[in-house]
Amino acid sequence: MESTIRTMIKNLSEKKGEEVLIKGWVDVKRDQGKMAFFDFRDATGKVQGVVFGKPEVLEVAKTLRPEWVVAVKGKVQERNDKQAKAYREEVEKTGKRPFFNKDVELEITGFEILNKAETPVFEITSDTSEINEEVRLKNRYLDLRTQRMQNNIRMRAKAMQLLRKELNEENFVEIETPVLTKSTPEGARDYVVPSRLTPHHFYALPQSPQQYKQLLMSAGMERYYQFAKCLRDEDLRGDRQPEFTQLDMEMSFVEEEDIIQLNERLLITLVEKLYPEKRIQQIPFPRMSYAEAMEKYGNDRPDIREDKNDPNLLAFVWIVDFPFFEKTADSDDPQAKGEWTFTHNPFSLSKPEFVEDLKAGKNIENIVAAQYDIVLNGYEIGGGSIRAHDPEILRSILRILGHSDEKIEENFGHMLKALGSGTPPHGGIAWGFDRLMMILQNEKTIREVIAFPKNGEGRDPLMEAPSTITQEQLDELFIELKELPKKKDE
């Protein structure tokens, strides 16, 4: 085929009457004897193409199958049927071009087959949400070709780009923090990684960048953010994954109100610019104390929508005034060190009126934390706090939680030393970015907005992970495997 500059399908309306070259996939084929119709697809859209009056081109056309990758040469012709008229009316009304460009069609003059394809295990042209999820995840590269999944992932990227722009304009610095770090007792189970160079020692994968972002405040960065990968070995459900993404941010010289106001502006901007079809129920976002939420709704993530049948209604609410501590629920909990456990984050600070109680370790059950959650339609999509920037306050918190002075030094000595180096008052928040995108995209699970998620059992069916490793690898790491316990029915 004669070389020509590729034209993206979304730009074909600007090329009426011209000969162009498009490249993409065969989406649909309709063979009508002396004519053949196709829908072609690339990353920007779909368009109809037709072959007639050219026997040598029709001969090639009849060999094509859905999902074959092709280069197609042809002349762009304006369409004048009912579908074209409806398309133009929609563009004029909304200002947006639908994915299927029905304004024009391609009068095909030549094909080049770039790659053939086996018959896909499910229809790429359909909404795969009702197809067995294991099949979809095993063939994720096919699933991601569908229009719904393309839209989910592309909207996620647009949201990231917009939020980066907004935060950069607010003088935040995007900083990556380590993925290999230290295991400390502060939440869910860690995923651990053995160190070949330091036998019998292990890294932990970060449950969150909590300590690093506070260390960045010690380092004088003042305003930090990142889209951070977080990994937690915990039981799964629809809005949880073993690895997930947080929009993580931390700020120096701020109070609770500053953080709430900034994040509220970010969320409003995100919805207004990328989801204009959606309506925010109340601006400014309402606020509700933890006690009020528990009394009125029985949980701390209430769904306050006026109409729960409206998928485009967004009801944000801030939950504030959390209890700092709660009684340890289960004495067998491996994370429980004493009589008390934290409700959110051991690195938090209390409300100012409770700081002296926090230092003295008294009136523990009544201490209110400077913590806040942002809830959307019944899902917690973010949470944060003002932090304990005084090392002695953090030491007192850890003692209340049952940590001995020796263990405090062993696990958190680096934090205490950093806080004592001249660390400003600071606080922050982390958004559950996958969960937010799930709601905005009207999906039922976060797996629908993650390119390559794990299944409900924490496995990756596509890569077949987790998997075994060789004996040679185990020997290099000085690891010996114990025999698995027999199942009850064996």
Image: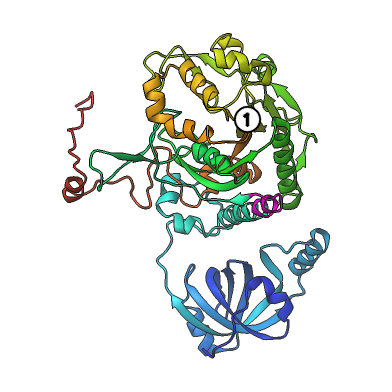
Q: Is residue 181 above or below residue 403?
A: below
Q: Position of residue 477 (x, y in %)?
A: 21, 45
Q: Nearer the viewer, residue 96 or 89?
A: 96
Q: Is residue 348 above or below residue 172?
A: above
Q: Nearer the viewer, residue 50 or 447?
A: 447
Q: Is residue 10 magenta?
A: no
Determine the image quadrant of residue 49: bottom right
Residue at 37% over, 22% down: 406
* Outermost residue toward the front in this view: 421
- Where does label 1 land, which residue? 386
10 Å neighbourhood of mark 1: few (<14), some, or many (≥20)?
Answer: many
Q: Is residue 60 above or below residue 369?
A: below
Residue at 53% over, 79% down: 71
- Would you say residue 480 is visible in this rendering? yes
Image quarter of the C terminus: top left
Q: Which stretch is magenta?
A: 163-172
